[in-house]
Image (cartoon, rainbow, N blue to C red):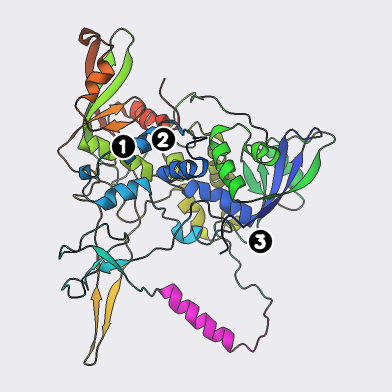
Amino acid sequence: MSDANEVKLCLKVMVNKQKTKVLFAEIDSNFADVLLSFLTLPLGKIVGILKKHYGEEAPVKFGSLTTLYDGLANIESNHFWTEGCKDMLLNPRSSFEAECLKLKLDIGDTQPTRFFGCADTDCKKKRSNVSMYYGKIECDCGKLLSKPMGITTHEDEDKDEDEEEDEDDDGKDDDVDVDDGGVFTGKKSSFLLTDDLKMAPSIQGSVIQTLISLGVEVPQGAEFLTVTVGFNEIIELLRASIFSETPLTDVVLRQTKTMGCSTVDSLHHKKLESPSISKKTMTVKAMVKKSTNKLLFFQAEEDFVDFLFSLLTIPLGGVEYLLDSNTSLRNIDNLYTSITELINDKYMSSPCTRTRLIKPELPPKYLSKNQIFPLTEQTTPTIYYFESGTVAEKCYRMCFKDPKGEESYIKGPGKYIVTRDLYVISCKTIGRSIMKHTTSSDVKAVKLQIGFEEVYFDYIIQFFLLSLFFYML
């Protein structure tokens, strides 16, 4: 794939006569795939992308997600089981890495999955320990797993066989495209896209009906424009999809209409009954100012902080799933609802793609025991160490080393302060600095039991998911 900064995507947009608003766009599968890849991005990855692109001169504050991320970045590494734990949270991986590597334009800078073994050539455990994280995890011998391993997959074997078949093909039918599938959408599929990111298949003979169903009105004098967008514009589209009422207009016509701190009229979360739902509860102490009934901060232990930081690993589509498409990020809600209601399997690259986008999994070894939301993770791939010698060939099944310790990221025991905007600090004195302008008689401590099945769950899911997007008032 070419450098992301050099790749360009084309789309046709219909704008009003005054050229002040995009009414809708016609997009191909390449653009649709890039747009749907937003749903695969972990929350922490989104923060990292925006920070890297816009920098300190024009910082983008993604609600409490940014402060949660900043607190994680600033907390000492000795609070984590391994160096790999902190890296997993600051740079969370996606369970769609294989797909994102095929995108025409990938804003997530996805890297191919690599595997690392013990750097000690004399290690007796080198045949059994493997990691996906360079130099972050120790082998059983105590040395770091940092030696790149050559991995051959079934896909590689199939590719070699295909290349051999191509060599025997005498050059016939060179122009035939045998790959009929795109990344997320079908390669030959095309779609209609509204300004607020509702997307529906573009079906010949039914375009007018589709536009009406999407709520699009085409006034007199409207005209089509052909637009080319690249890496910077797609990053801006991601930002605008979070902060603007008119993301497509923002990117195409450079007219920004920023959203305020919107609220949810009524909170809905999925009523899930599953054996995978965690029974775990955590106790936190909410410090509240009596005179105003205003939350000052939380006092919490390592399990609660582990839960908070693990929220950064949840993909945007996973938040949509948990909150039943009611996140207050209305453009993202529309994009997700397009997959659940408007686009069926016929227009996707494979039957399982739509299901995976609707309910995405975490990557292998990412699920923490302190995660109370009903999330699942991918199984680790099976890898064998093949040894060919002069006497005999041997094959050993390798074991993935978990970067986490005790099935969590944060090690205990530990005491933490969590501010109203979810900034986490491990410091006993911070409580006094927060309370220095508040008399102790005006402060009360309220103990909360936090768990999926607790009576406080509606409040908890609203606070700890919705407050990620907007600062608490």
For the record, the magenta segment spans 153-174
When the figure is inspected, residue 359 is found, relative to residue 440, above or below; the finding is below
* Label 1 crowd (10 A; few <14 / some 14-19 / many >=20): many
Q: Circle 2 sits on which residue? A: 66
Give the mark, 3 or 1, whose residue is nearer the N terminus. 3
Nearer the observer, 155 or 58:
58
Quadrant containing the N terminus is bottom right
- At x 49%, y 35%, the residue is 59
Quadrant containing the C terminus is top left
- At x 79%, y 44%, the residue is 224
Residue 13: horizontal and vertical position, in percent? 73, 44
CA distance for labels 2 and 3: 38 Å
- Disc 2 marks a residue whose amino acid type is Thr
- Disc 1 marks a residue whose amino acid type is Leu
Nearer the observer, 66 or 152:
66
Residue 268: horizontal and vertical position, in percent? 44, 31
Nearer the observer, 210 or 380:
380
- Disc 3 marks a residue whose amino acid type is Lys
- Residue 16 sits in quarter: top right
Point out the residue furthest to the bottom here.
391
Secondary structure under the numbered disc 1 in the rendered image = helix
Q: Circle 1 sits on which residue? A: 308
Whether residue 157 appears in magenta in the rendering, the answer is: yes
Tell me, for residue 79, which label it has, or none: none
The label nearer to you, 2 versus 3, is 2
Secondary structure under the numbered disc 2 in the rendered image = helix
- Position of 331 with respect to 75 (left or right) is right
Q: Circle 3 sits on which residue? A: 188
- At x 37%, y 51%, the residue is 362
CA distance for labels 1 and 2: 13 Å
